Amino acid sequence: MKRKQLLLFLFCFIFSLNIQAQKDITRLVEKLLASTPIEEDLQELCDDIGGRVTGSEANEQAVEWAYNKLRVAGLRVRKEAFNMPVLWLPKSTSVEVSGALNFKPSAVAKYQAIPNIYKGEIVYVGMGKATDFDALGEKIRGKFALVETDLCLDINGLFAEYAAATATEVAALKYGAKGIIFMASRPSGLLYRFITSKTTDAGQIPQLVMAREDAKRCIRTLQKGGKLQLEASIQAQVGGEFESHNVIAEIKGSEKPEEVVVVGAHLDSWALGTGANDNGCNVSMLIDIARQMHALNIRPKRTIRFALWNGEEQGYFGSWDYTKRYLADMDKHIMAMSVDIGSGDIIGFFTNGQAKLIPALDKVLQPVEKLGEFNHVNVPIVGTDNFDFMLQGVGNLVASHKPQVYGLNYHASSDTYDKVDLKSLKNNSAIVAAVVLGFANLEAQDITWERMSRAEIDALFEETKLEYTMRMFNVWEAWVDGMRGQKK
Ligand SMILES: [Zn+2]
């Protein structure tokens, strides 16, 4: 009799806990869909603080701003310091073309271009493929290779552009080019900045992105046989190692506090625009979710960490540091999510080679099923802060969004507050909250995935031919030589 009573009591207790967990998700979703300070916060971050390259004063302001937002909201929050390997803060790029044409095209230097004044003849190298360089051979040596690009309007275009640029770099170095001028892949004079795949090589050459229209003007003249000279003055503040900070807010788990769910968005940005869709919108979103969760006094079963990463644009240095700092706890990390593809509607999640996450995802998305149709894609994503969790074999997700204006404005001067889809951002906050709280509250039997071993991760990379992509983002060698990622 006693045993039966005890079992009944336990059953009722667990049942009521689960009812509570369901209620919490409903309350949280309702609160996030109602009026919250998410827009105000985003405006402060983008307009008042502005572009925030890691290592800049604005970036440190953003760290203080995020820390205070979370502290004022009542959360347990801390700044976690880590070292960035090199400082490169853009100041200005001015370019002059002379010869058959005399004008000042608008252009910017790519990341880690060595500040200097560069002069040389411009040679048109078509689309900048290896075969284009092969055809010109020695004619490239000591000259600036001007590369045509396809228009980039969406995220597939971005990946294609990164891949093409990497191939161009390799060929340009092989033939001894003095520098590379990429035609901007976006129209109407838009300029943007991103990393190069050879940033740490000694044989590095300056790389510029030139306004599409200006580059086309040069190409037309070169094709008619006109000769063009380039003079480029690249100004940047450069330096060695420096300290940066992630901002981490935590809600302790009530049942399994040692088990952790991480949700992150990067605080840093490039600074031609103000880092609105990349990635201020999702920083504001995570602050809002943390704030509302705390205000509603929600106690998840597992610990939730809201991570505002730094140093993402240079190679995910902040989230890499996190995986080193908490290395001993990686087995206890149930899931780590990155939200970094703007403010278009969330249409599912990338599950990064861990298909077993999908049934759990479908389950936790049920409370928000009215907010979208979710289709998950089980491919590994390189290019954001899920990366080091993936290398650690931890179950990791990247939110997948409708592209909308993301590709066009990516890293560009036009990535400003007015491009953010505020309505979708609100819906997205409810979706992300449901997933994060849902994973933190999952029953043990729903967690069917395990941390992957190094051999399993290697097999995944082999199967999905990830080496090229990882090289393109300059992170392949650190995995191979064991600097990053799971060792066993
Ligand atoms: Zn980003």
Image (cartoon, grey):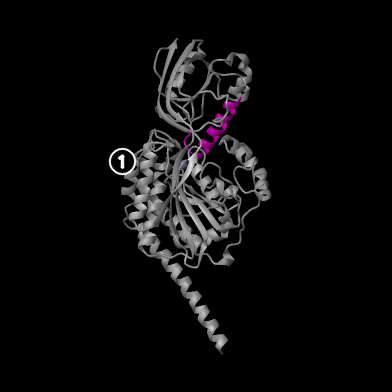
Instruction: Rate crowding at label 1 as few (under 14), some (14 to 19) or many (20 or more) other CA atoms within 10 Å.
Output: few
Residue shown at 60%/24% (left/top)? 171
Where 31 falls versus 244 (above or below)? below
Q: Position of residue 382 (x, y in %)?
A: 56, 42
Q: Position of residue 305 (x, y in %)?
A: 46, 55
Q: In the image shown, does 134 or 253 lie closer to the viewer? A: 253
Give amino acid for label 1.
Asp
Residue shown at 62%/42% (left/top)? 479
Q: In the image shown, does 33 or 17 lie closer to the viewer? A: 17
**Count of numbered labels shown in the rendering:** 1
Q: In the image shown, does 270 or 153 lie closer to the viewer? A: 270
Asked whether the viewer can see residue 348, the reply is no
Q: Position of residue 280 (x, y in %)?
A: 39, 44
Is residue 307 covered in magenta? Answer: no
Where 343 falls versus 95 (above or below)? below
Magenta part of the chain: 152-170
Q: Which quadrant does the N terminus fall into?
A: bottom right
Asked whether the viewer can see residue 73, the reply is yes
Give the residue at mark 1: 48
* Magenta-colored segment: predominant secondary structure: helix
Is residue 163 covered in magenta? Answer: yes
